[in-house]
Image (tube, rainbow, N blue to C red):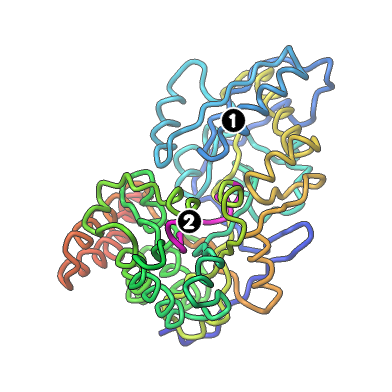
Amino acid sequence: MFGKSITRRSFIGGAGLATIAGLAGCSSSSDSSSSASSSASGSDRKGSVYWLNFKPELDETAQKLASDYMSAYPNVKVKVVTAASGTYEQTLTSEMDKSAAPTLFVIGNQDGVKEWGDYAMDLKDTAIAKLLNTDEYDLYDASGKLVSIGYCFECYGIVANSKLIESAGHSLDDIKDFASLKTVVEDIHKNAATLGFDAFAATDLDSSSSWRVTGHLANLEYYYEEQDDGGWDKCPASIKGTYMENYKNLFDLAVNNGPVDPTTLATGGHDPATEFTDGKVAFLLTGSWDYANISKKQTETHCIPYYCGVKGEEKAGLNCGTENRWAINDNASDEDKQATMDFMVWLVSDPDASKAMVEQLGIMPYTGAAESTNGYLTDAVKYSSDGCYTMDWATNYQPNVDDYRAALVSALNAYTADESDANWALVKTAFVDGWATQYAKANA
């Protein structure tokens, strides 16, 4: 159990800055300079922007903004390509090999700095960097080059439909820890046929949805272990798996109290987000990026913490951080780098453009950006103001992230097919031993 005092990280309202420890990059790269350090005047704007978008849910907004920008600046061509969920690294690798490579792309974590830092322009003292109102989300390489900067930060946890919970005879206010969450979830599942809805949306393990448990839910184990270690400032060579039982508590609760057979989760195809927005389930593992879509159909939802049985979790808050960090391709022409810089500045400072971005993304850490109306980020602020601790994104330290998560998925598939102790031991092996294995490969 979690016996140490928990480091509290504040989440401040208003501008919405989260004082969450930023992660420094760890690969070396030669310093680079660019003329794209200030915005060109409207009449001088020209060139091409190729934005390889990281977030599928932003695609519609991003395409419209690109069209709006080209209408305002007809000498600039803006192309937006959105990678399918779970395929960004693969898509980026493919696109960077092309002659017309992305000029604007994402380097979201330490592995990304190692892999792509040499491609990135140094953003220090550029026009976009000067608009930041916090440097908490910036990533640097070992030489001190500013490789990428956050364009939004997010929160995640368990999104709950308070109206459905009330119709089942419970209250969201009753849920204060894992025991109370379990009581509500199991009661709803037991009475699903009568209620007309179930508890948890399908926790699919296919590539479109497995991030919910191999990335986000995994964070609860890493976060509490990080706190035991006094905080991480670099990727540890190994982890202990101290809180694997807590991870199992919440994973089991989710997969065994929903409308689908757990043995079908490996193949996916259940569309958990639609299950939730259609009112077929009361709980969904997701976060602030889904608020815009959810709130169109379900108006009484809130994001609650990952209650999992850890001692003191009644003071837990939400998981807050980001992997959404922009980088400019330093191999692009000076003209295209300048065009990309101007487009970025417009996205975060133009009242209409930043409003559209914020409505979809939540909060943008830039002076002058529109204020957030995201309800789940409001929940995160309230937890913090009530004295709860914010869980930072220790998941960002996962070594060789794609290979590591693929091994987790494989083990979880075996477990959901047969929830035996032996198969759970395979999950723990992939989780814990897999970390050390992938760390060694990444640092060979």
Q: Position of residue 151 (x, y in %)?
A: 65, 44
Indicate whether 9 appears above or below 149.
below
The amino acid type of the residue labelled 2 equals Gly
Q: Is 329 in the magenta?
A: no
**How packed is label 2: few (under 14 Cα within 10 Å), some, or many (20 or more)?**
some
List the residue tagged with mark 2: 279
Q: Position of residue 81 (x, y in %)?
A: 52, 27
Indicate whether 295 appears above or below 415.
above
Q: Is 283 in the magenta?
A: yes
List the residue tagged with mark 1: 104
The amino acid type of the residue labelled 1 equals Leu
Residue at left 38%, top 54%? 399
In this image, 104 relative to 410: left or right? Answer: right
Part of the protein shown in magenta? 280-292
Residue at left 74%, top 13%? 74
Instruction: Name the mark on residue 349.
Output: none
The picture quadrant where one finds residue 183 is: bottom left
Q: Tag 1, which secondary structure?
A: strand
Quarter of the image with the N terminus is: bottom left
Marks 1, 2: nearer the viewer: 2
Q: Nearer the viewer, residue 106 or 233?
A: 106
Indicate whether 60 appears above or below 180.
above
Q: CA distance from mark 1 to mark 2?
A: 37 Å
Does label 1 or label 2 sit earlier along the sequence? 1
How many numbered tags mark residues here? 2
